[in-house]
Image (spheres, rainbow, N blue to C red):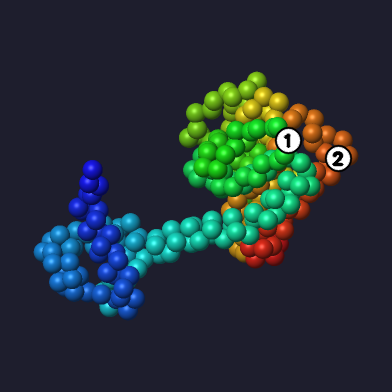
Amino acid sequence: MAKAILQTVDRALQLLEIVAEHPEGVMAKELEECMELNKVTVHRLLATLENRGFIERDGNGYTMGIKVVELSSMKLNNVELKTEATPYLRKLVKELGLPVQMAILEGQEAVFIDKVESLTSLRMYSQIGKRIPVYSSGVGKALLLQKTDEEILNLLSKIQFTQFTSKTLTSAEAVLEEIKQARITGYAVDHEEHEEGIVCIAAPIYDYRGEIIAAISAGGREGVFKGNWGQESIQIIKNTALEISKRLGYRG
C-alpha cells in the first residue's frame, strides 16, 4: 500500500530543506521559483515555519532557525550520551551484579534509553523505550534535582498519580520532600514505589554546561542497598554517574 503523505507537511519540509541549502539566506521569491508554488502558499508555509522557530528572517531573506539547532542537538546529545555511557554501565553491572539503566526526561516521564542486564534472574520493568512516571522512579526524581521547588510542583500538578504499589508516593509534596533529600545526598531512591520488592538507586548525569541531561540507576531486591556493601554500592553508582558526566565535559 502506498504511503500516505500529507502534501502541506511535505511542502513545508521541502521548503525547509531548500532554506538549509542557502546558509547565506534565501528570498521568498527564490523559494517560489524553486518550489513552483504561488506566492500565497509559500508565504503561508514560511509564516508557519517562522512562527515555530524553524526558520528566521533578516535582510538577506530566510535562514535556518534556532529550533532546528535545538532538535539536532537533542539527537546528537543522546547519541553521544549512549556512546560515552555504555562502557561505564557495563562496568557498573559487573561491579554490582545488578541490572543498570539510563533515562532522560520527557515531559512528566523518564524514558529509558539504555539498559544493561545482569547475570541474575532479576527482571525489572525498565526496558529501552519504556516510560516511567517521575514520581515513582529513582531516575525520575534524579532528573528533577536541578529544578526549583516551584517548577517541580508545577510539573507534578499536571500528573494524575497512580498507585503502583503500597509505597508509591501519591502527592506532589511527598515527592518534593524526597527530591530535597536527594539534593543533599546526591542520589535519589525508588523505595519499591513502582515494583513490589524492587529498590533502585539513581544518580544524575551532567553535561558540559552543568545541566542534568540524564540519570542512571541500579536496581535490586529490598535490602540490597543496606549495610556497608549497600553504602559502597551507592557510592559506586554516584561515581559512575560522575565519570560519565566528565566524559561529556562536566567540570563541576
How far apart marks 2 and 1 lie (CA) works out to 18 Å
Q: Residues within 10 Å of mark 2 (few under 14, many from 20)?
A: few
Q: Residue at x 29, y 70 (%)?
A: 19
Where is residue 244 drawn, in percent x and y?
A: 68, 57
Residue 125, can we see it?
yes
Q: Specify the quadrant of the image occupied by residue 120.
A: top right
Q: Residue furthest top?
A: 166
Q: Is residue 107 left or right of residue 10?
A: right
Q: Quadrant of the C terminus?
A: bottom right
Kind of residue indicated by mark 2: Trp
Q: Quadrant of the N terminus?
A: top left
Q: Assign a secondary structure to mark 1.
A: loop
Q: Residue at x 74, y 30 (%)?
A: 221
Residue closer to the observer: 186 or 38: 38
Kind of residue indicated by mark 1: Thr
Residue pointed to by mark 1: 120
Give the label on residue 229, or none: 2
Q: Residue furthest right?
A: 228
**Count of numbered badges drawn on the protein:** 2
User: Nearer the viewer's eye, disc 2 or disc 1?
Assistant: 1
Q: Specify the quadrant of the image occupied by residue 184.
A: top right
Q: Residues within 10 Å of mark 1 (few under 14, many from 20)?
A: few
Q: Earlier in the sequence, mark 2 or mark 1?
A: 1
